[in-house]
């Protein structure tokens, strides 16, 4: 049996809404990677909505959050890792799960050919992590939003939730507008990210 995607020998049989598909080892790994990103993207969005709701009512309602496991380390022969560099002094104060997700997405975008988007996410992540004029809590907030946008960018363009990404872009624009050290970088890369979702700011 041949892989439905690439034509190599298939070793996995998967039931999908379109019917039965057969995948080789490499294509199955990429399939699992996409499923992991989809779960994490939805979980992060739901967790953010829960936090926004609690802030709106002004009370800690104790809405349970969805635990987000770290993304799996998936490597195939054709992957080229373009790792995000974080200074050791910042590692202890940043959400390591978010950083792993962003690294994961940058690699995925690079290997899918969307190198401009990968470069934009990488540059903004590194700049936010290194910026000394913002507190750790604010850094993690920015990186969480960036992670949501970045993860959504890995979805096929026709399936991206464009309307849901616009408020996140506006929130980032507002935050970066108050940080002189990051404003220029945001102005450089925001058109690339906005273009992923056909958003006009």
Image (cartoon, helix red, strand yellow):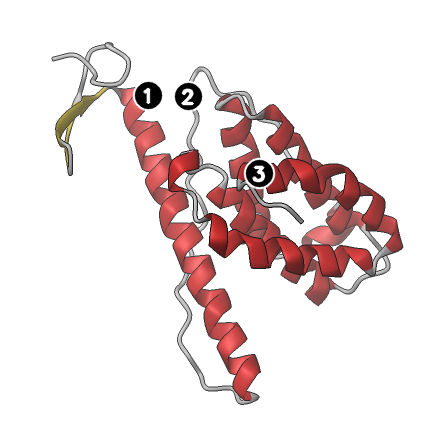
Q: Earlier in the sequence, mark 2 or mark 1?
A: 1
Taking the spot 46% from the left edge, 37% from the top edge, the residue there is: 154
Asked if marks 2 and 1 touch (Cβ < 8 Å), the reply is yes
Asked if marks 1 and 3 touch (Cβ < 8 Å), the reply is no
Q: Earlier in the sequence, mark 2 or mark 3?
A: 2
* Mark 2 Cα shell of 10 Å, populated few (<14), some (14-19), many (≥20): few
Q: Secondary structure at mark 3?
A: helix
Q: Answer with the quarter of the image where residue 200 lies.
A: top right
Residue bearing the label numbered 3: 103
- Which mark, residue 26? 1
Residue bearing the label numbered 2: 76
Taking the spot 65% from the left edge, 57% from the top edge, the residue there is: 170
Please name whichever residue, 178 or 131, is drawn nearer the observer in this view of the structure: 178
Tell me: 39 left or right of 143: left
Q: Position of residue 130 (x, y in %)?
A: 79, 48
Q: Secondary structure at mark 1?
A: helix
Q: Earlier in the sequence, mark 1 or mark 3?
A: 1
Q: Is residue 83 visible?
A: yes
């Amino acid at each position: 049996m041949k892989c439905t995607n690439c034509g190599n020998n298939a070793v996995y049989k998967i039931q999908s809404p379109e019917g039965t598909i057969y995948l080789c080892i490499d294509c199955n790994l990429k399939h699992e990677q996409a499923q992991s990103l989809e779960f994490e993207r939805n979980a992060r969005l739901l967790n953010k909505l829960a936090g926004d709701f609690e802030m709106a009512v002004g009370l800690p309602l104790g809405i349970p959050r969805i635990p987000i496991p770290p993304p799996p380390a998936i490597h195939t022969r054709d992957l080229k890792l373009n790792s995000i560099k974080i200074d050791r002094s910042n590692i202890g104060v940043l959400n390591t799960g978010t950083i792993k997700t962003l690294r994961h997405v940058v690699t995925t975008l690079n290997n899918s050919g969307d190198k401009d988007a990968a470069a934009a996410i990488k540059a903004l992540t590194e700049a936010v992590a290194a910026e000394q004029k913002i507190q750790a809590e604010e850094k993690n907030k920015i990186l969480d939003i960036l992670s949501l946008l970045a993860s959504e960018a890995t979805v096929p363009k026709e399936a991206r939730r464009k309307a849901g990404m616009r408020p996140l872009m506006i929130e980032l624009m507002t935050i970066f507008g108050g940080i002189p050290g990051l404003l220029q970088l945001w102005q450089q890369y925001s058109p690339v990210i906005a273009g992923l979702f056909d958003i006009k700011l």
